[in-house]
């Protein structure tokens, strides 16, 4: 179902960013072409080098290429993708999506993309349960965004609860199901 599909993975600043590496490889194993956009702070959790080596493509994080001043076109990235999956998606990024804030390349790409968007939230349970976050998730659903519910379990804070980014194999299964329907 994913053979020759162009999948754009957006990575935000969450401890769950390491799962993006597994997602890249899992999508490729299913025959998809994969590119990655990272928010600036996500680079504190996983490196561009790791995701570039796995995807076989440069990883995008800035509007401009520092080495030559070239432009990373958010419009071109959004048009290339058959599907955008933001995984992990922090509460901050989700709130910005709802508000239409495009202060980084990932959010600008999201706003310019007219293809299907999936979001896999990842955050502490209290943040996930917060009324503002729940309201934002409902707003995304109303906008047609597909939400992949987080799992319950041990969180980076040391607490237990709902907020763990769903496991990569479950995310891939949900996206395969989407393309097969």
Image (cartoon, rainbow, N blue to C red):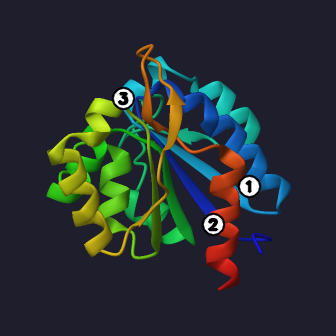
How far is the residue under mark 1 from the one under mark 2? 10 Å
Q: Nearer the viewer, residue 70 or 134?
A: 134
Residue at image location 63% in from the left, 66% down from the top: 175
Nearest to viewer (mark 2 / mark 3): 3
Question: Eyeballing the image, is 162 above or below 4?
Answer: above
Instruction: Give the number of the disc on residue 124.
Output: 3
Badge 3 crowding class, 10 Å Cα cut-off, few under 14, some 14 to 19, many 20 or more, is many
Nearest to viewer (mark 1 / mark 2): 2
Precedes in sequence: disc 3 or disc 1? 1
34 horizontally vs 25: left or right:
left
* Quadrant hosting residue 74: bottom left
Residue 100 appears in the rendering: no
Badge 1 crowding class, 10 Å Cα cut-off, few under 14, some 14 to 19, many 20 or more, is many
Q: Nearer the viewer, residue 141 or 77?
A: 141
* Quadrant hosting residue 83: bottom right
Badge 2 crowding class, 10 Å Cα cut-off, few under 14, some 14 to 19, many 20 or more, is many
Instruction: Give the number of the disc on residue 175.
Output: 2
Question: Eyeballing the image, is 93 above or below 18?
Answer: below
Question: Eyeballing the image, is 91 above or below 67?
Answer: below
Secondary structure of residue under mark 1: helix
Residue located beneath label 1 in the image: 27
Q: Residue furthest top?
A: 158
């Amino acid at each position: 179902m994913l053979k020759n599909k162009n999948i754009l993975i957006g990575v935000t600043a969450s401890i769950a960013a390491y799962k993006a590496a597994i997602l890249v490889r899992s999508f490729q194993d299913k025959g998809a072409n994969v590119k990655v956009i990272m928010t600036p702070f996500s680079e504190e959790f996983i490196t561009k080098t790791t995701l570039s080596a796995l995807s076989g493509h440069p990883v995008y994080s800035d509007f401009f290429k520092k080495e030559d001043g070239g432009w990373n076109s958010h419009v071109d990235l959004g048009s290339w993708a058959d599907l955008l999956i933001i995984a992990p998606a922090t509460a901050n990024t989700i709130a910005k999506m709802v508000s239409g804030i495009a202060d980084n390349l990932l959010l600008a790409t999201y706003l310019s993309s007219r293809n299907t968007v999936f979001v896999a939230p990842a955050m502490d349970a209290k943040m996930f349960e917060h009324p503002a976050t729940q309201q934002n998730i409902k707003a995304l659903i109303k906008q047609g965004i597909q939400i992949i519910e987080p799992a319950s379990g041990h969180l980076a804070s040391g607490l237990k609860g709902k907020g763990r980014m769903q496991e990569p194999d479950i995310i891939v299964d949900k996206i395969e199901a989407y393309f097969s329907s």
